[in-house]
Amino acid sequence: MPDGPPAIGTAPSLVAGRRRRTRPWRRIVTWGLLWIVAVQGFVVLYLECFHSEFLDPKYGCRMLALRERCRERSARPLLVALGSSRTEQGLRPSRLQSSGPMFYNLARGGSSPLLYLVTLRRLLADGVRPDGLLVEVFPPALVEGEESAVVYKPTLRDWPLLRRYPFQTRTWTAWLQDRLLLWYKYRSGFLASLAPELLPAQARWGEHLWDYRGGEWRAVGDWISPLERRRLTDDARRRYARSLNHFRIDADADRAFRELLEMCRAQGIAVVLFLMPESDEFRAWYPPEARRRLSSYLSDLQAEYNLPAVDARDWFDKSDFSDGHHLLKRSAVTFTRRFAREVVSLMEP
């Protein structure tokens, strides 16, 4: 007669045996995950405390290059530009002569008065004190307001300032995502620091897209077809015409702008305000009331803080722009040389 099923009394021992065999794997997986979290937490904390410039490469790479240039500049005064993508692409200090003040471009796309303030505070904390600050007045950033602004690549050292201003939750959502995906988001940076020879040339975005001699954006074209210019100008119109048509000075943008100027006054840093070139078509998007409000705001700032200003809005024709407000490279070089002369003349005692 064949054997019957095992006795019921044997089942618990079989189950216990299986549990004993699987338990080590659970411990290994659990401890492995804990070590991953611990190592990642340690690396994030180390970078936040000691190398926060690594976590914002657009600022960090240029700041390190600027610090190196400051060691070489002898007695030349340092003039740092803050602004939007207009300045990021249009001001090209690397094309200036080595005599006179040393200009450096720390502008970046998506800037606002709050991001200007963040950048200056970082720069001073990193031991770089400019003799003069060239501050772009970017009208769309004044009308949008800080509550709609995204501060890109914030770090924990920016928190004491940012908590005093309203801004989109996307700012800290992006911060959390960057820290959770640290090894993926910053893989090129880690390789560039530890084994740069493993990176292909096109992946070295710092070398490919930025000119560290002057801090400017390298990837600006010399020529654009009329059809492409029309397409890009129409896109700029969709982005800016409506806000300029309802132009007003947002209270928080004004507060950040004035805090920036107060900090410069306290630090003894000279300031020059400037407006970047715009085509006739782009300037036509400002209704008369918007032009009056912008002019009045600039006059108030100049009078209150005793500031000179450079108004370059009508310096170029539409053929010099890719989209009505971003200069092509050939025009950017011409602008830079004229702008530098204007700034030097305004800052002479």
Image: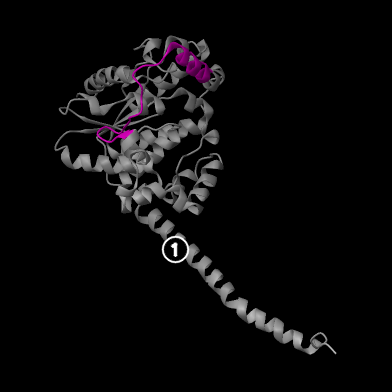
For image coordinates 46% across by 40% down, the residue present is: 152
Q: Which residue is mark 1?
A: 39
How many neighbours does mark 1 have within 10 angstroms: few (below 14), some (14-19), or many (20 or more)?
few
The spot of residue 19 in percent (x, y) is: 65, 79
- The correct choice, above or below, for 154 with respect to 343 in the image is below
Q: Residue furthest front?
A: 1
Residue 217 coordinates in the image, percent (x, y)? 34, 30
Residue depicted at 75% across the width and 88% down the height: 10
Element type at mark 1: helix
| Residue that appears at 15% across and 27% down | 99
215 part of magenta stretch:
yes
Q: Is residue 65 magenta?
A: no
Q: From this view, report whether residue 301 is shown above or below residue 320.
A: below
Q: Residue furthest right?
A: 1
- Asked whether 296 or 334 is in front, the reply is 334
Q: Which residues are magenta?
A: 210-237
Which colour scheme appears in the figure?
Answer: one colour
Horizontal side, residue 106 vs residue 20: left or right? left
The residue type indicated by label 1 comes to Val
> Can the viewer see residue 75 in this picture?
yes
Residue 292 visible to the viewer:
no
User: Looking at the picture, does residue 157 appear above or below residue 219?
Assistant: below
Q: Is residue 130 left or right of residue 286?
A: left
